[in-house]
């Protein structure tokens, strides 16, 4: 009787050893297969995803592809950008410093209107150029190339200076403070527009470093061309075709 029990116990122990060995080998195979699979390209016929983060091997973020709800707010000068409303869906690019450096966003613009924009940013600052399209609900739209002059300071520093100037109670002093920032090239200014306006005219508008329009080349909706040179106050100082020649031709 005792011998029988010992024999059964030995068989059970032998079974447990075999089971443990098989289980260990199976786990090892699964573990190694998982790591091997990670190094292979995966192929999908179709995939639904709300956000994709493109990162380097060290985990540094380089690009985000996302819907509106999960869109990255952006980082400038190492600080997360505070936004009062959701950011549009699209792709956001990040540079080697970890800051946003532009992207492609699109979305609605009320009712049937929509927009799309591709931008590139200055280091630690905002956009310097963009290809944009903006259509309103009534069907009118503007599209073209835009360029901005960004100050050689981080955008959070620029915005802090602007906010302080806007807090000045006296209107004249407030405007003077903001103008000082412009004169010192410490604010963003418009430099160029090339494209189609909402009134169906085509226009090339070039401004100086302070954002003052200096040259305007335009083709009106009726096909009439015009070239204007402006001084720093916005006054037209020369026009082609010249006004007097145009009047003579009309006579």
Image: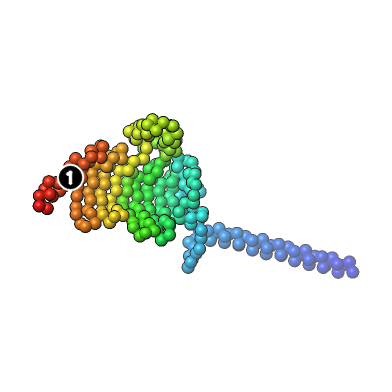
Residue 251, position in %: x, y?
10, 52
- Snapshot quadrant of residue 134: bottom left
Give me the residue at 13% from left, 50% from top.
246
Residue that lies at the very extreme toward the front in this rendered image: 251
User: What residue lies at 68% left-to-right and 63% top-to-bottom?
Assistant: 23
Q: Position of residue 48 (x, y in %)?
A: 50, 63
Return the x and y of residue 215 as percentages of the image width and height. Answer: 23, 44
Label 1 neighbourhood size at 10 Å, few (<14), some (14-19), many (20+)?
some
Residue 90 placement (x, y as % from top left) = 44, 55
Q: How many numbered marks does the figure carry?
A: 1
Tell which of 28 and 141 is nearer to you. 141
Residues 123 and 249: in front is: 249
Query: What residue would you read off at disc 1?
Result: 239
Q: Residue furthest right?
A: 1
Residue 191 is left or right of residue 157, and the answer is left
User: Mark 1 falls on what kind of element?
Assistant: strand
Q: Is residue 186 left or right of residue 52?
A: left
Classify residue 206 as left or right of residue 175.
Answer: left
Which residue is located at x 39 percent, y 33 percent?
171
Quarter placement of the N terminus: bottom right
| Residue 53 seen in this snapshot | no
Q: What's the coloring here? A: rainbow
The answer to whether residue 210 is seen in the rendering is yes
For the point 32% across and 43% down, the residue is 190
Residue 47 in the image: above or below residue 84: below
Task: Identify whether 16 is placed above or below 117.
Answer: below
Q: Nearer the viewer, residue 84 or 121?
A: 84
């Amino acid at each position: 009787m005792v011998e029988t029990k010992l024999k059964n116990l030995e068989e059970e122990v032998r079974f447990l050893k075999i089971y443990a060995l098989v289980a260990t080998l199976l786990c090892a195979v699964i573990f190694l297969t998982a790591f091997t699979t990670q190094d292979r390209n995966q192929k999908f016929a179709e995939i639904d995803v709300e956000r994709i983060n493109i990162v380097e091997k060290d985990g540094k973020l380089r690009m985000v592809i996302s819907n509106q709800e999960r869109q990255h707010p952006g980082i400038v000068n190492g600080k997360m950008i505070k936004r009062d409303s959701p950011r549009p869906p699209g792709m956001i690019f990040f540079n080697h410093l970890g800051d946003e450096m532009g992207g492609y966003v699109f979305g609605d613009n009320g009712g049937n209107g929509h927009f799309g924009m591709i931008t590139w940013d200055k280091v630690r600052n905002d956009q310097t150029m963009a290809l944009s399209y903006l259509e309103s609900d009534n069907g009118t739209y503007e599209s073209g190339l835009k360029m901005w002059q960004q100050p050689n300071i981080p955008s959070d520093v620029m915005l802090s200076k602007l906010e302080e100037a806007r807090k000045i109670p006296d209107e004249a002093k407030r405007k003077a403070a903001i103008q000082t920032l412009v004169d010192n090239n410490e604010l963003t200014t418009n430099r160029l527009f090339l494209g189609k306006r909402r009134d169906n005219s085509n226009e090339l508008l070039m401004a100086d470093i302070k954002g003052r329009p200096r040259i305007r080349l335009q083709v009106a909706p009726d096909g009439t061309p015009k070239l204007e040179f402006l001084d720093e106050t916005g006054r037209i100082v020369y026009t082609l075709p010249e006004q007097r020649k145009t009047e003579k031709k009309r006579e």
